[in-house]
Amino acid sequence: MLGLVLMTPLAMAQDIPVPQQPQPQTMIPSAPQLAASSWILMDADSGKVLVEHNADERLPPASLTKLMTAYLVEREINRGNIAMDDMVTVSEKAWRTGGSKMFIEVDTQVSVSDLLQGIIIVSGNDASVAIAEHLAGGETSFADLMNQHATRLGLHNTNFQNATGLPGESHYSTARDMALLSQHIINDYPEHYAIYSEKNFDYNDISQPNRNRLLWRDASVDGLKTGWTTEAGYGLVASAKRDDMRLISVVMGTSSEEARAQETQKLLSYGFRYFETMNLYERGSVLNTPRVWGGESSELRVGVDRDVLMTVPRARNEELTARLDIQPDLTAPIEAGQRVGTLEVRMGEEVVGEQPLVALDSIEEGGIFKRLFDQVRRFFTNLVGGWFG
């Protein structure tokens, strides 16, 4: 059972029961060791890292770069700056770009929708350059935009020089940063995510398969992107969902297409077998009603403004406890959404998560007599509390 300990002023600690989620005792083995340079396994909802190895090592990302290219296209669509049916004129530079291709023709017009599919499904370098020129006027300017968003998203060990992932002296990323970027793709723009699961793309009378072999082997896998260059080796960012749990895996620097698929499958199987993601408290849940001074109401509903998700080993979910630390002497006015404390989740003695506690309602100042009455009452309450504290 998850127990909730309330640390509130002028009140005793209190446990709030939640439904038990009993699990049979599970022995958890050590994490698998992979034939790769770097890897990471993350829960897409909670952000909990389950397994990692050299996850912050800067490596050439190859076509994993296109995850950022696609992310920026999706962002611009959602902001209304471009539309799926907008037409993009193909430049000679885009047409001549080497490597994997969507096979667009110079001086023709291609829809943003087709280019986005060409980037995600068949890893088209030509499509990536075309969209970069359309959004930023040129690939260099687009790379600058990519780096600005990398900073905004907390990708601390990433630097892009182009939209494709073709080798560059200062073009690098990490397994951790690729996982974080994928988490944003999945959660920020879910309406576009289905493209990453498409197995084939037909354009210009040419049919090409998605290079992510797991889309055919594992029905729970529905994305995201492959990458390869001689310098980078073979990489794969994958995501899978089973029941209510979604995982993101990244492997970089494997020896072949088959190796990256097999090593990714090892990570995903380990994560789903030995971990679970629990929704401890739903957004808007009332976790406490502390005293408010000088307001029209004397009680404030306090809770969370987002779901509280925790990823834990399956054998240890009953060890979770939570503590509310609410600011003392809450005084009106208070606005809905205002932070008033912290929810701390522990597994044993280890803090495994924190989330802001917020006011779920607004409380206006009370009338002058209510405020004076509360001032007197608070004085004597604090005095008594000081005697017995």
Image: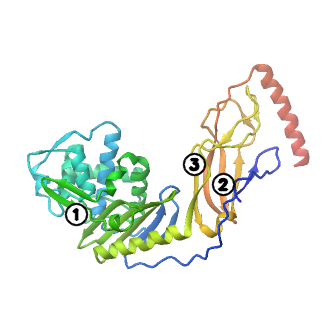
The 10 Å Cα crowd at callout 3, few under 14, some 14 to 19, many 20 or more, is some
Counting residues from the start of the chain, the first of labels 2 and 3 encountered is 3
Residue for point 27% across, 65% down: 211
Measured as percent of width and height from the top left, residue 347 is found at 66, 64
Indicate which disc residue 344 carries.
Answer: 2
- Element carrying mark 3: loop
- Under mark 2, the amino acid is Glu
Counting residues from the start of the chain, the first of labels 1 and 2 encountered is 1
Camera-side residue of 93 and 141:
93
Q: Residue at label 3? A: 307
Measured as percent of width and height from the top left, residue 194 is found at 35, 52
The 10 Å Cα crowd at callout 1, few under 14, some 14 to 19, many 20 or more, is many
Describe residue 64's horizontal placement relative to residue 207 as left or right: right
Camera-side residue of 56 and 296:
296
Quadrant holding the N terminus: bottom right
Q: Residue at label 1? A: 166
